[in-house]
Image (cartoon, rainbow, N blue to C red):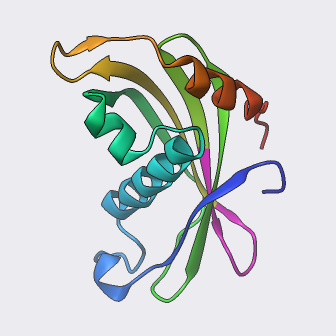
Amino acid sequence: MAELIETYRGTVYPWQCDHMGHMNVMWYVGKFDEATWNLFAAIGLTPSFLREGKRGMAAVEQNISYRRELHAGEIVAVGSALVEVRDKVLRFVHEMRNAENGEIAAVCTLIGVHIDTQTRKSRALPAEVLQRGRALVRPYKE
């Protein structure tokens, strides 16, 4: 995860596990979502910035590839990278690992569009956000 920014660290709780004994898919999505907001904050898309500017981010595509099971008590780390930054669009990746052994548990790729929350239409990202985002763009290869 050296070239990725750590955007989430947490634990798999017993109540997050399903009848198969591993973390249920809904919790992968939740942990990736928390990582997303930390990645956005790193480029200036903080909750207060979005609220005050009547801006938002809309997920338009999300793909998750599950690689290894995670079980209750395991520590999870998510590393993230921006893969592409366009005028209104961010494409990014999250890599979830078992923090103890480093094995990749899941990879999530997403595309988000910056929107005006009043008109519900896409809107250009501010120049300072584009600049910070482009500085963090990394090619991603597993």
> Residue 95 at x, y = what percent?
63, 52
| Residue in view at x 28 percent, y 77 percent | 19
In terms of depth relative to the viewer, which is nearer, 104 or 37? 37
Which image quarter: residue 121?
top left
Q: For the view shown, which residue lies furthest in the right direction? A: 2
Asked whether 100 falls inside the magenta stretch, the response is: yes
| Residue in view at x 57 percent, y 27 percent | 129
Q: For the view shown, which residue lies furthest in the front direction? A: 52
Residue range corresponding to the magenta coloring = 94-104
| Residue in view at x 25 percent, y 28 percent | 54
Asked whether 65 falls inside the magenta stretch, the response is: no
Q: Looking at the picture, does residue 124 appear above or below residue 56?
A: above
Which image quarter: residue 137?
top right
Q: Is residue 5 rendered to the left or right of residue 11?
A: right
Q: Looking at the picture, does residue 56 appear above or below residue 15?
A: above
Q: Looking at the picture, does residue 32 appear above or below residue 72?
A: above
| Residue in view at x 59 percent, y 46 percent | 42
Q: Is residue 142 rendered to the left or right of residue 72?
A: right
Quarter of the picture containing the C terminus is top right
In terms of depth relative to the viewer, which is nearer, 4 or 14? 4
**Residue 17 visible (yes or no):** no
Quarter of the picture containing the N terminus is bottom right
> Residue 28 at x, y = what percent?
42, 59
Q: Looking at the picture, does residue 5 appear above or below residue 114?
A: below
Which image quarter: residue 21?
bottom left
> Residue 103 at x, y = what percent?
72, 67
**Residue 40 visible (yes or no):** yes
In terms of depth relative to the viewer, which is nearer, 130 or 60? 130
